[in-house]
Amino acid sequence: MQKTFRKAAKISLILVYLVIAAGAIVRMTGSGMGCPDWPKCFGYYIPPTEATELQWSANKEYQKGQVIIKDESLQVAKEDFKTTDTFDSQNWAPYTRHDYALFNPWHTWIEFINRLLGALAGLATLVLAILSFRFWKKEKILTLLSILVVFAMGFQAWLGATVVYSVLEPVKITVHMVMALIIVAMLLVLIFRTSEKAKAPSHDKTAMKLMWLALGATLFQIILGTQVRQFVDEQIDLVGETAKNLWLEAPTLQFYAHRSFSILVLLLNLYLGYRIFKKLLGYRKITWVLSLLGLEVLTGILMYYLDFPFATQPIHLILASLLFGTQFYLVLEALNAQKSPKTL
């Protein structure tokens, strides 16, 4: 029973990370508005592949909620009906959430795949919550936390809708990312609490404080990174996608803060690793943390000095989210070790 639940939690975690990866690709390709409505995409459950499917046609049947692009605006079918030889505006209502009315099949399908992965992740967490009821009598916290994950996924879906309705407002994108990390943390708690109890690492108060500090620093760095990414998006709109050498020609204060703070994050984690290895505390995942951090710094350097090589942007974000998850698991191990009477 416990193994099945833990496996379901791991599957849910993998799917959540796939959603984070898909979201990073959405941002890299500028596909955030590929589906201008929510939860459907141009009024379809399976989005169109050609612009002609979104054009008004004579003698064609339309279903309620179906979307067309007419005079550079989105029009939504009021009811099920069949068109005549001329366009009748009484059958249509303007889409009022925003005035974005462009269709790019690549952007549409990239965003659709992102939403599809989100739906799969939501379904996986629902299965996890159902399985968790087996623990109700012995460990209610597992059931309650599993249910909370489902609600968190629902809230995350709502946040995704608000991001679309706001036409990718930066603050809402940041909140959307932070919420994904919170879901990752909750799933890691479920995985940790149902894992086979191996020998706990040694407790060290200073190391624990450093772990919490490093985790908070990573979260702050991710938030700063989303602001830098927004600046890059704005520069792309100004100078174009091909002028990569100009994207960071006149960076904002957030960029310098993000770059400078990365040095502090690196030094903090290096010192934590030094203390763990010197005192033989047994936190093996610190090697994961340092490896992910090294790759994170490398991708940041590549983006700045080599003008954003292909895929470095989504890889940078994915590495940051993996780093956060690994650091959080370290904190869970430290909290568990704190229960042991042995201290250093």
Image: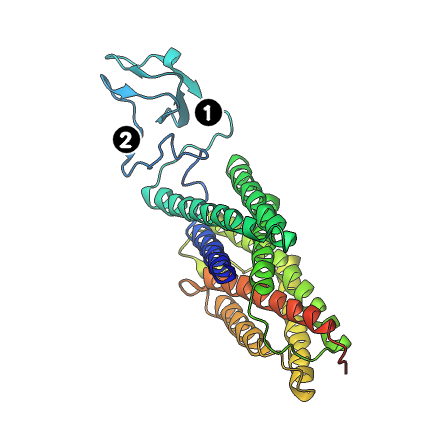
Q: Secondary structure at mark 1?
A: loop
Where residue 326 sits: x, y (%)? 57, 68
Residue highlighted by disc 1: 95
Q: In this orientation, does residue 322 appear?
A: yes
Q: Give the vertical position of 164 relative to 326 (above or below).
A: above
Farthest residue in the bottom direction? 278
- Left of 315 or right of it: where is 210? right
Q: Are marks 2 and 1 in contact (CB under 8 Å)?
A: no
Judged left or right of residue 284, residue 241 is: left
Q: Amino acid at mark 1?
A: Tyr
Number of disc labels: 2
- Considering the image in quadrants, where does the C terminus appear? bottom right
Mark 2 closeness class: few <14, some 14–19, many ≥20 residues within 10 Å: some
Q: Which residue is mark 2?
A: 53
Amino acid type at circle 2 is: Glu
Secondary structure found at label 2: helix
Q: Position of residue 199 (x, y in %)?
A: 62, 78
Q: CA distance from mark 2 to mark 1?
A: 17 Å
Q: Nearer the viewer, residue 266 or 258?
A: 266
Q: Is the residue 129 above or below the residue 70 in the image?
A: below
Residue 329 in picture, x, y percent from top left? 60, 67
In the image, what residue occupies the spot 40% across and 63% down?
310
Residue 277 place in picture, x, y as percent = 64, 86
Is 150 positioned to the left or the right of 77 in the image?
right
